[in-house]
Image: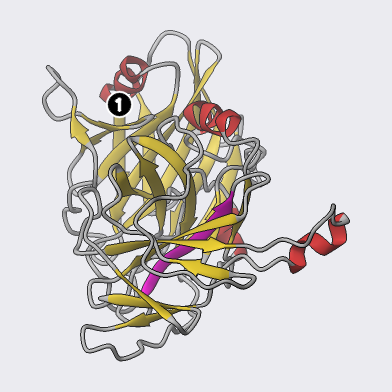
């Protein structure tokens, strides 16, 4: 279940450029979450996927343990399975905008407030869980885990004893399902030294079950690179790749560098739903404000017209433009153009209007 927590200081690419497309709004979410002790389940994500992975989440606050528990055990690590129908619980997907590698970022919401985010791979039939990650409130005795699963997963067995149903949610596309689990942590009395904090039980053991109650094995596989990625920095020219990006003259616009992928290959194997592949990314400065412009292809069929971007909404009075959080997008041929960062949606759309992509596969 490869995941990467995004509530961290911004990463930087090998070109020395700001890695994330999304630093602005996530800073506000991070400030609201500084008191939270967050831990995630991390496994076999390629090191290259760490470059530039930041989801552009709406500002939000810490989520609390929900009501409607189905069962309780009175021992350390007791499980309290919360009702997924808790008002306001939702999960959104945002493409993981890493050049050369497809992936999704999961954004959890409670009462329309972001409660945490993590990034990882793509859903496939051999991986029942797309994402599993959890967090604890500072000083609290509860641990919340959110699992996002493929459509075939009807229930989740928690710690071998309790079952919680997965549910479809308004913002989850492709038939994906989610469950929210609350674990009661019985902490020892007194203050523990730092080196013993990791021994406190937190993440429950989860087993995915199909509609007949049969376990579905989780095969640990890395999300493959789908091209060779080259980084560059101005005043050098961008290396030749499968995609090229050019911006027509805008007063005050300067290019800083970026990344391009060459020898783009289709995603090997089956996907659940769709996935998106970042083919090129260029960092610009517009009057000293950084913007990141990207060319995005269909991961499974790079030459085909990509599907709609989940959760992106049409921009009012701007036909052909879409936005989600701090991202703005428009179609161009068989690709999406996406612009992140900047001071406002208007600034991102201004750059979008002046971008010309070239795709040669």
**Callout 1 environment at 10 Å: few (<14), some (14 to 19), or many (20+)?**
many
Magenta-colored stretch includes residue 131? yes
User: Which residue is found at the position 41% from the left and 70% from the top?
Assistant: 71
Give the prevailing secondary structure in the magenta stretch: strand
Q: Which residues are magenta?
A: 129-136
Is 196 left, or right, of 107 in this rendering? Answer: right
Q: Is residue 184 visible?
A: yes
| Residue assigned mark 1 | 352
Is 37 left, or right, of 169 in this rendering? Answer: right
Residue 98's spot in the image, x, y percent?
47, 51
Question: Which quadrant of the view contains residue 200?
Answer: bottom right
User: Which residue is found at the position 27% from the left and 67% from the top?
Assistant: 300
Where is 245 relative to 274, above or below? Answer: above
Residue 55's spot in the image, x, y percent?
45, 43
Residue 44's spot in the image, x, y percent?
57, 72
* SS type, badge 1: helix
Is 141 left, or right, of 302 in this rendering? Answer: right
Where is 323 relative to 82, above or below? Answer: above
Q: Nearer the viewer, residue 355 or 144?
A: 144
User: Which residue is found at the position 66% from the left and 63% from the top?
Assistant: 186
Question: Which quadrant of the view contains residue 127?
Answer: bottom left
Magenta-colored stretch includes residue 33? no
Where is 78 relative to 304, above or below? Answer: below
> Can you say which quadrant of the picture contains the C terminus?
bottom left
Q: Nearer the viewer, residue 112 or 279?
A: 112
Is 315 left, or right, of 239 in this rendering? Answer: left
Q: Is residue 227 visible?
A: no
Residue 253's spot in the image, x, y percent?
46, 16
Q: How is the image coloured?
A: secondary structure
User: Which residue is found at the position 24% from the left and 48% from the top?
Assistant: 171
């Amino acid at each position: 279940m490869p995941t990467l927590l995004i509530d961290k200081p911004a990463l930087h690419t090998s070109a020395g450029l700001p890695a994330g497309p999304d630093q602005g709004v996530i800073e506000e979410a991070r400030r609201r979450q500084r008191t939270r002790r967050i831990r995630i389940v991390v496994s076999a994500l390629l090191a290259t996927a760490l470059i530039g992975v930041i989801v552009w989440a709406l500002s939000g606050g810490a989520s609390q343990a929900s009501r409607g528990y189905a069962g309780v055990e009175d021992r350390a690590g007791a499980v309290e399975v919360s009702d997924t129908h808790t008002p306001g619980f939702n999960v959104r997907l945002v493409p993981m905008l890493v050049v050369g590698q497809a992936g999704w970022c999961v954004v959890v919401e409670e009462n329309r407030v972001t409660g945490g985010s993590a990034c990882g791979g793509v859903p496939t039939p051999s991986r029942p869980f797309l994402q599993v990650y959890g967090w604890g409130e500072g000083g609290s005795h509860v641990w919340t885990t959110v699992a996002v699963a493929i459509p075939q997963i009807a229930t989740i067995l928690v710690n071998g004893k309790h079952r919680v149903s997965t549910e479809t949610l308004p913002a989850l596309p492709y038939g994906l399902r989610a469950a929210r689990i609350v674990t009661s942590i019985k902490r020892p009395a007194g203050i523990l030294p730092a080196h013993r904090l990791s021994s406190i039980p937190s993440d429950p053991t989860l087993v995915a079950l199909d509609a007949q109650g049969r376990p579905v094995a989780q095969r640990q596989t890395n999300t493959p690179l789908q091209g060779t990625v080259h980084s560059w920095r101005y005043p050098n020219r961008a290396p030749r790749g499968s995609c090229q990006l050019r911006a027509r003259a805008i007063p005050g616009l300067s290019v800083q560098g970026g990344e391009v992928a060459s020898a783009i290959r289709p995603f090997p194997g089956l996907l659940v739903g769709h996935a998106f592949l970042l083919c090129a990314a260029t960092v610009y400065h517009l009057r000293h404000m950084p913007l990141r412009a990207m060319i995005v292809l269909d991961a499974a069929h790079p030459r085909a017209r990509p599907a709609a971007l989940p959760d992106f909404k049409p921009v009012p009075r701007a036909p052909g433009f879409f936005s989600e959080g701090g991202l703005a997008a428009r179609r161009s041929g068989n690709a999406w153009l996406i612009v992140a960062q900047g001071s406002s949606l208007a600034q991102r759309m201004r750059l979008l209007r002046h971008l010309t992509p070239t795709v040669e596969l």
